[in-house]
Amino acid sequence: MGIPLRSGNVRIPNETMRLIIMAFAGVVFGLFLGVSFPTASLTKMNLPSTLFPSIDLTYIEDKYSGLSTQTLFNALNTLKANKDSSMSSYNYTEKKIWIPTNPRGAERLPPGIVTSESDLYLRRLWGQPSEDLTIVPKYLVTFTVGYNQKDNIDAAVKKFSENFTIVLFHYDGRTSEWDEFEWSKRAIHVSVPKQAKWWYAKRFLHPNIVAPYEYIFMWDEDLGVENFDAEEYIKLVRKHGLEISQPGLDASSAGLTWAMTRKRDGSEVHKDTEERPGWCTDPHLPPCAAFVEIMATVFSRDAWQCVWHMIQNDLVHGWGLDFSLRKCVEPPHEKIGVVDAQWIVHKSVPSLGNQGKAEGGRAPWEGVRERCRKEWTMFQDRLTNAEKAYYGALGINPYNETAN
Ligand SMILES: *[C@@H]1O[C@H](CO)[C@@H](O)[C@H](O)[C@H]1NC(C)=O
Ligand SMILES: *[C@@H]1O[C@H](CO)[C@@H](O)[C@H](O)[C@H]1NC(C)=O
Ligand SMILES: *[C@@H]1O[C@H](CO)[C@@H](O)[C@H](O)[C@H]1NC(C)=O
């Protein structure tokens, strides 16, 4: 391994020069733009147009390519005088950087420049970077939306203060219509047709990308929020040490499946419940404790760091995840709970279901529902097999209850 890496480092002068010029071009271009635009072919990131005034990028690019050779040469010399390491001609072999503790693949960089975490903060193309943000949002809320639910989402977003970064995942391809809402201009719009919440979460909410946010709200579009305030909710979650939580569901909610997620009157939070006889093998395990649903889940930064890794790329509906969230916190029956004092109504609008496909005489939602159930089994099998493999390698049978 060591030899090919080493020989790869000894570059012929021409190649070094080419790299220097490319790096320099990057610096100059960066100076003008202040931001680089990701070009993802699959997705279209729609950033608010008001933050990007009518500058003509073509004009800037023209201007750059129109820089005279003399100007480039002068700028190059200025950088050299500043002892910019990427420009100076010291002995690379002797001073080669290799920092094993850097993130994998970035070992050649001096640690001071390594930026392994990001954020979803919107910046300006001009001015001092340090003055870009007037408020530094500490929390993140994401909604997976179709335009038909716009009034519901508008009402929901208004329950989240300016301390929240707002992300909308659009599954119906309609994004520009949302500009009728003032808040839409400070929201981040990610549009990928016909995907489900956990598909977006896996792709766009990597823990390193959402690192600055203390709490992450991952919500569906069909929630009634009249009796909910996000800042108050966070106060309660902090007070009761909840790493994974959801607001209690009002009795008027559609499809109240579980006793655990029902709102309780006169209580701030609850962490366990009684279920129908025979439904719980252990009072500390789902669905009697250590359990919330996936429609309005709220994760702490640490919990999300774990949960993101548990989400499967192909199991987009996330069914079964609710029963396994407990794998990510310890002890789960104390760190997972339902907030009663800030509660919501689950309206159960069959929206994403309609994005399915009518097949064999069945309605689109039937195929979606069938896939949800299948995914649940598949997820459960994968998790069980993974645990068996882990404990098997250690020679332990975790399913031997008398052993504990
Ligand atoms: C660079 O340093 C290495 C190791 O000290 C040495 O073998 C090599 O001759 C040096 N090259 C130059 C151009 O000074
Ligand atoms: C936003 O966060 C700051 C700092 O924690 C807090 O003082 C302020 O009240 C919050 N804003 C709202 C609307 O709650
Ligand atoms: C379960 O664990 C107990 C105690 O360690 C042991 O005596 C028993 O043989 C185990 N049973 C099985 C089926 O592994």
Image (cartoon, helix red, strand yellow):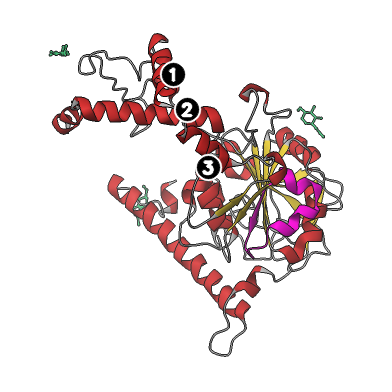
Q: Nearer the viewer, residue 84 or 130?
A: 84
**SS of the residue at dot 3?**
loop
Give the number of the mark in front: 1 or 2. Answer: 1
Q: Could you tell me how far apart the alpha carbons at marks 2 and 3 are, in whole angstroms?
A: 15 Å
**Residue 92 screen position, x and y as percent:** 24, 18
Is residue 183 part of the magenta span, yes or no? yes
Q: Which residue is mark 1?
A: 75
Q: Which residue is mark 2?
A: 28
Q: Which residue is mark 3?
A: 37
Q: Amino acid at mark 1?
A: Ala
Q: Which residues are magenta?
A: 167-187
**Residue 83 screen position, x and y as percent:** 38, 10
Indicate whether 78 appears above or below 242. Answer: above
Of the four image quadrants, the one with ligand 2 is: top right
Q: Residue at x 52, y 34 (%)?
A: 63
Q: Could you tell me how far apart the alpha carbons at marks 1 and 2 are, in whole angstroms?
A: 9 Å
Q: Nearer the viewer, residue 293 or 369?
A: 369
